[in-house]
Amino acid sequence: MKSQSKPRQVGEWEWTATILGIAILFGVFVRVLPAFRSDFPINDGGMFLVMVRDLQANGFTLPLYTTYNFMNIPYAYPPLGFYLAAFLAWLGVPTLQVLIWLPALLTAFTIPLFYFLALQMLKNRPRASLATAFFAFAPGNYVWLLMGGGLTRSLGTVFFITSLIYVQRAFQNPTWRTTALALVSSALVVLSHPQSALLTALGSLTLGVFLIRSPKAALHAFLIGAGVLLFTLPWWGSVMLRHGIQPFFSAGQSGDLRASLLALWGNLLSRQTILPFATFFRWMGLGWVIYTRRLDLIAWGFLAYFIDQRSASIVTSFFYPMLAAYGFLDALPAAVHFFRTRTWQPQKKDAFLNQQALSLSLLGILFYLVLECFFHAEVIRKVALSSAAQQMAVWVKQNTPADSRFLILSGHPDVMTDSIQEWFPALAERHSASALQGLEWTLGSQFYPRWEQLSVLQSCRDLACIESTASKINLQYNYLILDTHHTAVDFAPVFLARGYTSIYSNEQYSLFAK
């Protein structure tokens, strides 16, 4: 009589390699797909295009001001991304292509990097691989990095991840090699992106509280901090010598506690896909890390909401996939066991590896998330500046005086995510009174009121509202640009009746002179 063969047991490495392979293969593909299908940078990047050109024109020496929108905006933004783009342009790569492809490639690189970060924080290969899959297939985690402005955002994200990896290693097992790598990574994030730099500092301080347990580790932590300040001194020192500390204070606006709590709650409830699998497992994972007292993870994931809620979602884009991995691989099996036996008994480590129903369900969920990412790839591509907008800007550059001042009525309430508002000064080389980009470095506490007033302007439904709002914030203009597709009402007849002159129109935009 033949003995029955036992089902083949799936090993930890095999399970990990399968999930991680799916995450990297499809995650990279959905990130580069929009670049393949676009002939213009996605959404934003106009200001960065001008800053790269300013750097080239100044012989690769940091200019005093950027020429973007002719508003004397200090050239105080971390310059590493601009140097990289300018160098690629010097090699012959068109700058617009750099703004399309470099963010896509850097964003794709964050997937394998995230695995090593998750492995270090979760201390388990299967959890780290599943967290990487949830990270790879969450469109909201990478859309902002793929845009033209991702030139600095994606670069900052790459160094944010590497900094946290090496900072943790330096705190846990300090060696001169890990300390040097932590120092260099942290310095590069400071030179890449301001919000990523702030979050790296917060993350390092939080992890230090939980991980530093010896005078040697404390010494290495001090050396990392001091070394970062020294390494980045040529940049921030030159900015402060020329402009003082005010641009940094102006750009570092923070919200109040109430706004932080509301942002935290809204972010916890957010879903990026139609079927909110990741959100469901995120909540299960949150319960699990509270139950297992992973206070270090909780502090790291949520502290930023009480410091700068505008940047906090960057941290949660890494934290939530880790929670989701805990939710699926730890909390879910424990909950299933409880409903079956009415006893609470957390499952043994990696007991899920050979639970066929769990593995098949996971593959189905990942397949669904991949499909959602393919759908979002098309949505992402469509937020690039339209050809009609590009044609209109070129016409303005060729047919209006260099000192012309424009007011753009696009009908888009959020002017900071409105592609025409940012790209018009870069392409037309004319001043836009309604552009907000760059003013975070000059307006200080008036930045958010200006943002709100410009949002009101874009929502106006009559000419009186337009003129009174523009007068209230002292917008000076002698030309109006009207997006005939998206403004609340058809303003063209109103402008003509008020004495404006129509000077140009295409299938989407109409221009009027006062």
Image: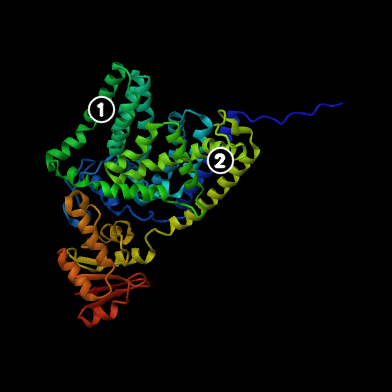
Secondary structure, mark 2, is helix
Q: Which residue is mark 1?
A: 225
Residue shown at 51%/41% (left/top)? Answer: 133
Residue shown at 37%/67% (left/top)? Answer: 388
- Picture coordinates of residue 290 (x, y %)? 42, 35
The part of the image, by quadrant, that contains residue 44 is bottom left
Query: Please, what is the three-letter code of the amino acid marked with disc 2?
Result: Ile
Cβ–Cβ below 8 Å for labels 1 and 2?
no
Q: Please state which of residues 399 and 463 is positioned toward the viewer in this rendering.
A: 463
Secondary structure, mark 1, is helix
* Residue 479 drawn above or below residue 155: below
Q: Residue furthest bottom?
A: 497
- Picture coordinates of residue 243 (x, y %)? 13, 43
Q: Which residue is mark 2?
A: 22
| Mark 1 nearby-residue class (10 Å; few <14, some 14–19, many ≥20) | some
Query: Please, what is the three-letter code of the amino acid marked with disc 1?
Result: Gly
Cα distance between the residues tagged 1 and 2: 37 Å
Q: Quadrant of the N terminus?
A: top right
* Residue 279 drawn above or below residue 322: below
- Picture coordinates of residue 145 (x, y %)? 38, 47
Q: Residue furthest right?
A: 1
